[in-house]
Amino acid sequence: MKKRHEQKLIILAILLLMAFNMPLLLIFDSSQAVGGIPVIYVYLFSVWLIGILLSLIIVKRYYE
């Protein structure tokens, strides 16, 4: 794997760690709901999905 792609994955991992940090999670911990789903669940699963998709894009570029 190229050094550039490794660096992108490391940066993505650090950003995801910061996104799942407790002070940021407490911002979304409220009694409000989006479409009947609590806001914290929407935040957690959307950040998780975005992280998976971004890592997939980075790894796919390596194999091209």
Image (spheres, grey):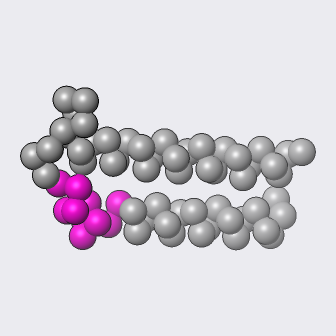
Where is the C terminus found, in terms of image quarters? top right
Q: Position of residue 61 (x, y in %)?
A: 81, 49
Relative to 29, say whether 8 is above or below: below
Outermost residue on the left side: it is 31
Residue 21 vertical position relative to residue 58 in the rendered view, above or below:
below
Magenta stretch secondary structure, dominant? helix
Q: Give the side of residue 14 with respect to residue 58, left or right.
A: left
- 56 to the left or right of 25: right
Residue 21's x, y, as percent? 32, 66
Q: Residue at x 53, y 50 (%)?
A: 51
Question: How many numbered marks are there?
Answer: 0
Where is residue 29? Give x, y as percent: 17, 54
Residue 4 found in image quarter: bottom right
Q: Is residue 17 magenta?
A: no
Check the picture and name the quadrant holding the N terminus: bottom right
Expressed as whole percent of the image width and height from the top left, the position of residue 35 reads: 25, 30
Residue at the image position 22 percent from the left and 62 percent from the top? 27
Find out whether residue 26 is within the magenta segment. yes
**Residue positioned 53% across, 63% down in the render:** 13
* Res. 7 image quadrant: bottom right
**Span colored in magenta:** 20-29
